[in-house]
Image (tube, rainbow, N blue to C red):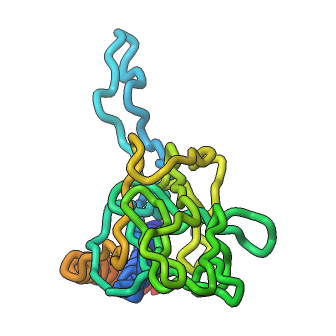
Amino acid sequence: MKSLQIAATGMMAQELNVEVISNNIANMRTTGFKRVRAEFQDLLYQDLRRVGSASSDSGTVVPTGIQLGYGVKTGATSRIMSQGNLANTEKELDLAIRGEGFFAISLPNGQTGYTRDGSFEMNAQGQLVTIDGYQVDPGITIPDNARSITINRTGGVEVLVGTATTPQEVGQLQLARFMNKGGLSAIGDNLFLETPASGTATQGSPGDAGFGDLLQKFLESANVNAVSELSDLISAQRAYEMNARVISASDEMMSATTNILR
């Protein structure tokens, strides 16, 4: 019976759906994380009676036909790039992007990664780096005798050095944005890579038209809504159970047919 195979595709689809939801829930406390949504498409159809085919020699046509679907498949796992809540951390090197844009990160393999995670640190050379030690691009170096660091909303980095009372500017942070940010490829460690689907990065300063601005001593929380994810999880579980019930019913029907033939 085809219903066994059809229901099996439904169960596999909901298994994947639960995996996506579980990853969202697991990353509820991950800085800058963007939730993912599984999207599904129906599979091919068998035409038992083709719609629009001639039903007589006088030119009448079949108005609806008979089509049998073969189940469901996963079409995509779309990343929702909406803004997460901003949380105050009181840490000088924590930065949140309020609006559009990504921080550019120089990776060890020469590629450029992009992130919304602004939990930065200083390395031994005073360079601004991620928690994995990857340098923020463009490079910002803090003097070793700096006693305070100020990063304004437009990305300007100023420090007070020694006993000076006048701030000294040591760099300017930039942001990158993409035509299709949902087309970025996630590689873990809160990093994304540019792809042909995302388009090439457009660089700009925070606060420029189309770019967000920066908030010092803040971090962007994950945009995961616990209530929504739990509701989706329950729906996925119910859909899985219903597909399992179809398999059970099909098995009983096949058993009944077998008993008749005995």
| Residue under the point 53% across and 76% down | 190
The tally of labels here is 0
Which image quadrant is residue 216 in?
Answer: bottom left
Res. 33 visible in picture:
no
Counting from the top left corner in percent of width and height, residue 8 is at 46, 75
150 with respect to 239 (left or right): right
| Residue under the point 75% across and 64% down | 111
Residue 170, compared with residue 250, is above or below; it is above
Of 139 and 119, the residue lying toward us: 139
Of 229 and 94, the residue lying toward us: 94
| Residue under the point 53% across and 64% down | 169
Q: Residue furthest right?
A: 109
Res. 49 visible in picture:
yes
Counting from the top left corner in percent of width and height, residue 153 is at 36, 60
Counting from the top left corner in percent of width and height, residue 79 is at 44, 63
| Residue under the point 32% across and 86% down | 89
Counting from the top left corner in percent of width and height, residue 42 is at 43, 55
Residue 239, compared with residue 114, is above or below; it is below
Of 19 and 249, the residue lying toward us: 19
Residue 158, compared with residue 20, is above or below; it is above
Of 115 and 225, the residue lying toward us: 115
Q: Residue furthest top?
A: 58
